[in-house]
Amino acid sequence: MSQMPQQAALPKCPSCAEPVEPGDRFCGACGHDLSVVAAAPQDHPTLTMTDTGPPGDGVDWPAPEPPGSGGTPAGVHLPTDLPGTDSGGRPLPPEEETAPGVRFDRPAEPEEYPLQAPDPRAAADAGAGPAGEPVQVCVACRAGRVDSDGYCENCGHAQPRERDHMEGESGPVAAVSDRGLRHHRNEDAFTVGHTTLPDGGPAALAVVCDGVSSATRPDEASLAASRAAGDVLLAALPRGTHPQQALHEAIVAAAQAVNALAEEPATAREHSPHQNAPACTIVGAIVTAGLLVVGWVGDSRVYWVPADRSAAAARLTEDDSWAAQMVAAGLMSEAEAYADERAHAITGWLGADAYELEPHTASFKPDRPGVVVVCTDGLWNYAETAEEMSEVVPADAAARPLHSARVLVGHALDGGGHDNVTVAVLPFPAPPQGAVSA
């Protein structure tokens, strides 16, 4: 996740230690009931023993019983001493036919006890909600309804979220987003698309947004921003808007969509007065015939990886972050800055609490075919330099963009998966004529 400065520490689940929001009833990662207080250990009183052993052994044992007593102390009556009847008042079978104490009015115990099936009435009731709307049934108990927060009303189990793992394709571009291995939800989002320019040429685009983890509702912010930016691009490019101008307008529209999320009722602020506004970062790329345009706010990145791996790869964006500022000011080397714990404190983001919006855009004219990798820091934390990214991008990425996006997400998960990870891969075809960066 991207981070704004001065983050507040969140409470942790006592079961899995995953951060939880104040007021949560259940842990989003493991479903642990946060309202339950651990029960005190059961009291086991010390038992005493009475002695009948050899004199002086210091131990009290039960007294030996007289021979032939059958193990029953004198003066004690057993239930089998008196005649009994069954439930219909009939005498029980003769004692010699049965072992003492055996009841014939109960069935034999099975060797295995199968788990009890869910109550079919509960499952039937969970199948339809108000006005006949379908209701999700819990994946754990298979009987309880799932509430709007994603938890079972019966057992409290957290349900898999739709955004935990997402994949998308549109024409030549593909993207994959995954929750990762450490976070309880996916706060990244993406939009991919393709369209036709007024001259009939193709255009492919990808927008990737990373929710700011220290802000309120970061998952909503990233989703709103990616959708708004994608809609603007798919509308502007066919009208003939220059790709660089279109991407600038898309980032502005994305910022407005995130700002709108902060316009919540006054009662919401009364319940959570210290929460900041929703926020996210954004990065996008557009590929047309011979032209590559990138735009961003925040620390998500775009990499250029040529098909000929003997040629140099390149990083096409500069982070809006504390680390980037230290490097630009000449106060630290890049290695030193990104090793600092403040490295990922961002200095630019989308949201009502952000500073003045300053979208960055740039255009390039690669002279050879390759692929464009658009990603959040969930990936580039494990392949930071352009050379490292070039090494992990599959050789057939231009022909298999979805497969390549999956491979790159897998690389991040294999590296530890400490963050949400989102990757889009856009093939860049061989340009009609050689060109240089613009």
Image (spheres, helix red, strand yellow):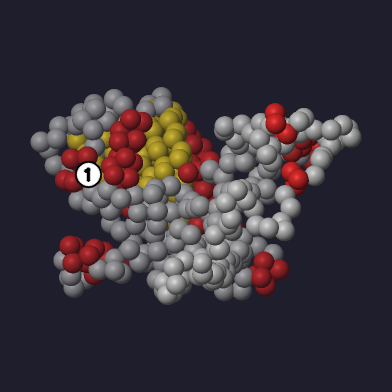
Residue at figure coordinates x 51%, y 37% from the top left: 235
Left or right, 65 with reference to 131: left
Tell me if residue 207 can be seen. no
Residue at figure coordinates x 18%, y 63% from the top left: 334
Tell me if residue 394 can be seen. yes
Q: Is 299 above or below relative to 174? A: below
> Around disc 1, counting alpha carbons within 10 Å, would you say few (fewer than 14), some (14 to 19), or many (20 or more)?
many
Q: Which quadrant of the rendered structure holds the C terminus?
A: top left
Q: Estimate the x, y position of residue 81 in percent, counting from the top left.
A: 76, 45
Q: Estimate the x, y position of residue 10 in percent, counting from the top left.
A: 48, 68
Furthest residue in direction front, as rendered: 67
The three-letter amino acid code for the residue at tag 1 is Met
Most foreground residue, 129 or 323: 129
Q: Is 319 above or below relative to 189? A: below
Q: Is 117 above or below relative to 422? A: above
Q: Which quadrant of the rendered structure holds the N terminus?
A: bottom left
Residue at figure coordinates x 67%, y 66% from the top left: 268
Left or right, 35 with reference to 233: right
Residue at figure coordinates x 33%, y 36% from the top left: 405
Residue 197 placement: quadrant: top left
**Where is mark 1, residue-wise?**
389
Residue 57 placement: quadrant: bottom left
Q: Estimate the x, y position of residue 298 in percent, counting from the top left.
A: 37, 58
Q: Estimate the x, y position of residue 162 in percent, counting from the top left.
A: 53, 41
Element carrying mark 1: helix
